[in-house]
Amino acid sequence: MAAGQELSADKLIDMLSLSLPKLESQLLHKKYQYAGIEFSGDTAFNTYEHRPVGGKKNKQADPVRRRFTRAVLKNTFTLIYQTTSVNEYNDFTGELKKKGFYCEYEKDKTISPAAYLYQHGIYTAEASVKKIRDTAWYSICFYRKLLPAPSELKFADDLLQFTSHEYLVVYFGANNVKRDLYYFGGEDIVKCSILFMNTNRQVIFIWKDNLNSRKINNLLIGGKHKLKSQQINAKSVEDNNWWLKSGIRAGMPLSELRTLNNKNIAFCGGDAPNPGLVLPESSSRIDFKNKDVILGCTKCDDDKFLHAKIMSADKAMTEGRNFFILTIALYPVESGLFE
């Protein structure tokens, strides 16, 4: 176990910051040999296998098999440590918890996840067990996230880099990030995180990974939303200080949106499933394909609007209707294996 003890949780976390040459030098010193490279999309996986040399004649060679894999994708550095020793695996998870890593559902016997995710600051560790050819491999996958400098955080689009509740807390502070539940309707309820709640900088993060509050499904900017914390007094935040790179913001009048797009805009009327939703074919200078722009209106309680399926910006403005951007739902571009 000596070689395994040398690669402690602390050591692996430190290795996340090393360049590939320095990492390989340390692994070589610990009797790891390069075993090849594999690609998954744009991600390169460099793998190393532990190949100890037998010591004195009266000592047996270490029977534990170990592998080490390194990968980098955009702003996430990843190390995967695999071992056939359950004791070594348990030692790693124990170390993580002592360092402040947490897994909310670790003791929940009602669920059986494929992996247990431990989070702490900019680090994430995914612990799992996989059987390969009758051999149980215990794996700890470490992620290190590079968060943007304050000068790089200018637009709402930039918030898509914060792919977990934990990253939001690290960057913006626990007082500015609240956990909540979002009600889509019926029994469709998901976990969400709210940045700057009830202010003109509020953004709601809807998570794909509901168990771990990570991997963004979409960001919601502006509007009134059904949240558990506001079941009695739901608050509307139409005007919002977050601008998108395209130049739009919640609260923007339809006339400004029309001018900015330089093309007539088609949107759903009152008789459509999603009233106010701008249709993707309206895209011109503004790309409506990777975001949902939902319009609100202060003069839309008449039969003409309520019975319309599709409306146009030019006609609505001619009729004197007061449309504005109520809510923007911003979706991330799929980034591959690690988020």
Image: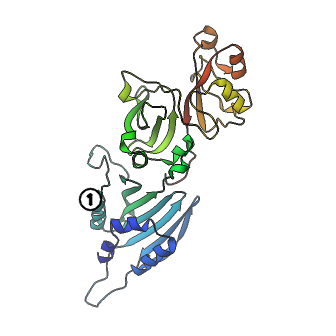
Q: Where is residue 162 in the image (x, y as percent from the top left)?
A: 48, 47
The residue lying at 46 percent from left, 39 percent from top is 205
Q: Position of residue 195 (x, y in %)?
A: 44, 38
Question: 100 or 153: nearer the eye?
Answer: 153
In the picture provided, is 291 more to the left or to the right than 9? right
Tell me, yes or no, if residue 147 can be seen here: yes
Above or below 247: residue 149: below
In the picture provided, is 117 more to the left or to the right than 301? left
Q: Position of residue 201 (x, y in %)?
A: 48, 35
Q: Mark 1 points at which residue?
A: 98
Q: What residue type is labelled 1?
A: Lys
- Label 1's element? helix
Above or below 179: residue 237: above
Tell me, yes or no, if residue 133 can be seen here: no
The residue lying at 51 percent from left, 38 percent from top is 218
Q: Position of residue 8 (x, y in %)?
A: 33, 68
Identify the image quadrant of the N terminus: bottom left
